[in-house]
Structures are given as structure tokens and as C-alpha cells.
Amino acid sequence: MAVIIDAARYGAHAREVAHAFQVRLIEDAALPPHGAVSFPVGRIVVCAPIIDDTTYAVALHEIGHVVAPRGSLSGSCRPEGFRHELRLTVVEEDAAWTWAHHYALEWTPLMDHVERWGRASYHEALDRLNAAVVQARQPRVTPND
């Protein structure tokens, strides 16, 4: 069974990891608890204050977008449209979550819940987009045919 780390240790560890990978980590109280964004080119992550295991997971995930080998592909690839970009985003999300798992002090059930929600949102969007593309390619039958 994992030892639960206190919230202060989570924040300190996220800041240590960011520093070790030369990422500027900005905790902004104006963001909602699961709100965060990364700017890989500038090596900057902006997240809500790290106050528990879920905000810690989000912060590590965003750092993963900056430093994981496949955490940020969109800027280095030539876009081929929204569908292509969404596929890249799914790869980036998976890479960033995998990276966060590797560097986390522990992975709690609440962290797992946040990860599942995050991964699902992108996979569901890609599934919806793929279904729409398939439907758009179907021949349309008109009443006069």
C-alpha cells in the first residue's frame, strides 16, 4: 500500500521536478483546480496552486507536455487539418500522462481519476470527429433517387 504524501510535499516535489527539467512552473490562484496550460517553446507551465494529489497530477502532466519526448508534437509537425491535430493531441496527452506517472512520488486513486477524465476527453473528441468524417463520406440519398 502506498504511503500518502502530504500536500506541501506534492507542491515542493512538483517545483523540484520543474526546476530539474528547467521548466518555469507558475501557480496561479485564478485558475480552477484542474486548470492548467503548458507553453513548450518557452518551457513554461501555468497551473492552479498545488494543494492536493489531483492538482499535483495536473501540474506533473503539464510539465510532461514540455519535457516528454512526445509531449508536444503539434509545434514540430506540419498541420494537416483539425483531425490530424486532434490525433497528435491524443499522442501528446498520453505521453504527458505517462511521463507524470514516471516522475510522481506516488499515484493515488484520485490522481488516477483525473488522468482517466483527461485522457477520455481527448479520446472521445477524436472518436466523435472520426464518426462525423465517416458520416460525411456516406452518399446522400435524396427522395428523387
Image (cartoon, helix red, strand yellow):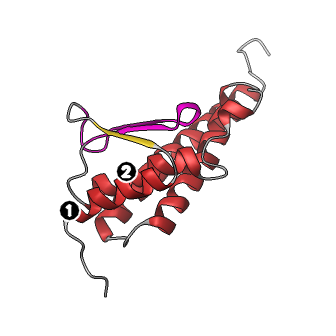
Q: Residue at x 22, y 58 (%)?
A: 52
Residue 131 seen anywhere in this rendered image of the structure: no
Q: Is residue 74 shown left or right of residue 52?
A: right
97 is within the stretch colored magenta: no
Q: Is residue 133 shown left or right of residue 37?
A: right
Question: Whole-percent x and y of residue 29?
Answer: 20, 35
Q: Residue at x 32, y 71 (%)?
A: 108
39 is within the stretch colored magenta: yes
Instruction: Name the amino acid, label 1.
Output: Ala
**In this rendering, the label closer to the viewer, 1 or 2:** 1
Q: What secondary structure is found at the residue carrying circle 2?
A: helix
Residue 24 seen anywhere in this rendered image of the structure: yes
Dot 1 or dot 2: first in sequence order is 1
Could you tell me how far apart the alpha carbons at marks 1 and 2 are, in whole angstroms?
Answer: 14 Å
The image shows residue 108, relative to residue 135, as above or below, that is below
Circle 2 residue? 58
- In the displayed orientation, state which residue is furthest to the top: 144
Could you say which is closer to the camera, residue 21 or residue 109? 21
Question: Whole-percent x and y of residue 105?
Answer: 37, 71
Q: What secondary structure is found at the residue carrying circle 1?
A: helix
Instruction: Name the amino acid, label 2.
Output: Val
Q: Which residues are magenta?
A: 31-48
Q: Is residue 41 shown left or right of residue 45?
A: right
Circle 1 residue? 7
The image shows residue 144, relative to residue 10, as above or below, that is above
Q: Residue at x 24, y 72 (%)?
A: 5
Question: Whole-percent x and y of residue 59?
Answer: 37, 49
Quadrant placement of the C terminus: top right
Could you say which is closer to the camera, residue 94 or residue 103? 103
Q: Residues within 10 Å of mark 1 (few under 14, many from 20)?
A: some
Question: Whole-percent x and y of residue 118?
Answer: 43, 49
Q: Residue at x 47, y 60 (%)?
A: 100
